[in-house]
Amino acid sequence: MEKAYIVGVGMTKFGRHPDQSIRQLLDTAISTALGDAGGHKSDVEAVYHSSSTQGFLQGQTFIPGQVALGQIGLSGIPVFNIENACASSSSSFHLAVQGVGSGMHDIILAAGVEKMNVPDKKKMFAVFDGAWDVATVDENIERLVSLGKGMECPEGSESERPYSIFMKVYAAFGLNHMKRNGTTQRQIAAIAAKNHEHSVHNEYSQYRQAYSIEEVLAAPPITYPLTLPMCAPISDGAAAAVICNEEGLKKLGMDKSRAVEILASVSMSGNAERTADEPENHMARLAAQKAYQMAGRSPDDMDVAEVHDATAIGELMHAENLMLAPLGEAGPAAERGDFTVGGRIPINPSGGLESKGHPIGATGLGQLHELVTQLRGEAGKRQVENARHAIHENSGGLVGIEEGAAVINILGKVEA
């Protein structure tokens, strides 16, 4: 495989965009990414496009990429539509890395877009109902919610307003972690407070309000141990990245000092036979081990991370899956400030999905946008000092008691 690089990134602000179409959001992200790479739409040889909810919410069930991209001047080239739940755009990125690494193409665009805020709020929440085996919904709920059995939930800790069933699933993951490891709700709140503090300095973030741990704990409940600031919002937005090999760098005439090398890209699917008693075999952890081996790096080499935190419990779990904290110890590490910018290993300096937002088909590329910005030293007040290596985790859907799909990427700053 040839070396692969990220040479351009672009994204919209995540949030509510009632006056912008999917095409407009996508054009903004793509034009920014190509401008960042010093390239033009005519330089793109293939596109991997992700938009997970468009078929359900807008009715564009087939060829969403060809329709939207054709309207903004990207037609006549291969376009592949990738759906992998919340890991969709990271999967697009993973395939783009394979495409330039094989030499099939020299310059590939990975792009993702979502417009999830629609007038029909019931439909907006129902979009998540297809992220597991829809033939066994009752069994899915029973299996996952049972993970939290034995933990008492305080009175008044359940929202009276409707919310996604996946918040209850995340809550069960959290209760299981609390039961096995002594993790506290306060430690989970520390993760959310840290991410909201980071988001204050990110102009792309949907929410930019700082919260203390006490304010997170006192916020309206969703389902114990989750409160509202611990959960990602529903978002619109787009993100894109230009990926190339050495020949692509020559074609673009780009200054290699702004390129970011992709040291590893690994994709893995969930195993329905896995049990909650074997966290050491979680598929994201196995994928991370493979990525470290591929990159020739270790967890200790990582300077910054972006992980999938549809809730703060997601960050708790994936900090351990990436071996940035020992199993069972991410809670105390978060409370100590280990994952804060300036701490031992900053996680989600962007503010994470909890603050930045979660437009499903664009989420993974939004995370990569942050890591490229960090490795270039361009993150301003949220900059991680001397960041040279970064790790990225993005996952989605559910198979058994773990995610259906996960993508792990390790990036490195190109040495002068």
Image (cartoon, rainbow, N blue to C red):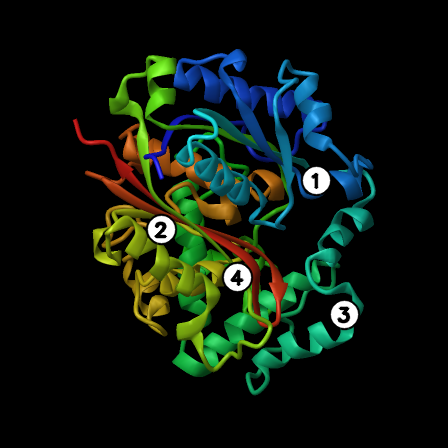
- Rounded to the nearest whole Å, what is the CA distance between mark 2 and mark 1? 26 Å
SS of the residue under disc 2: loop
Q: Mark 3 vs mark 4: which is more N-terminal?
A: 3
Marks 2 and 3 sit apart, C-alpha to C-alpha, by 33 Å
Q: Which mark is residue 347?
A: 2
Q: Decide: is 123 above or below 287.
A: above
Tell me which label, 3 or 1, sits earlier in the chain: 1
Query: What residue is at 32 percent from the left and 25 percent from the top?
Result: 246
Badge 3 amino acid:
Val
- Which mark sits nearer the N-terminus, 2 or 1? 1
Q: CA distance from mark 3 to mark 4?
A: 32 Å
Crowd band around label 1 with a 10 angstrom C-alpha radius: few (<14), some (14–19), many (20+): many
Amino acid type shown at disc 1: Met
Foreground mark, 3 or 4, reads 3
Which is nearer the eye, 11 or 407? 407
Image quadrant of residue 201?
top left
Quick one: which residue is furthest to the left in this view?
A: 416
- Disc 4: which residue: 218
In the rendered image, which residue does mark 3 sit on? 137
* Comparing labels 2 and 3, the label whose residue is closer to the camera: 3
- Crowding at label 2, few (<14), some or many (≥20) Cα neighbours within 10 Å? many
* Residue 362 location (% of width, % of height): 57, 38
Q: Closer to the camera, 188 or 269?
A: 269
Label 1 SS:
loop
| 3 or 1: mark nearer the eye | 3
What residue sits 40% from the left and 45% below the top?
197
Tell me the mark number nearer the camera, choosing from 4 and 1. 1
For disc 1, the marked residue is: 116
Secondary structure at numbered mark 4: helix
Label 4 crowding class (10 Å Cα cut-off): few <14, some 14-19, many 20+? few
- Residue type, mark 4 in image: Ala
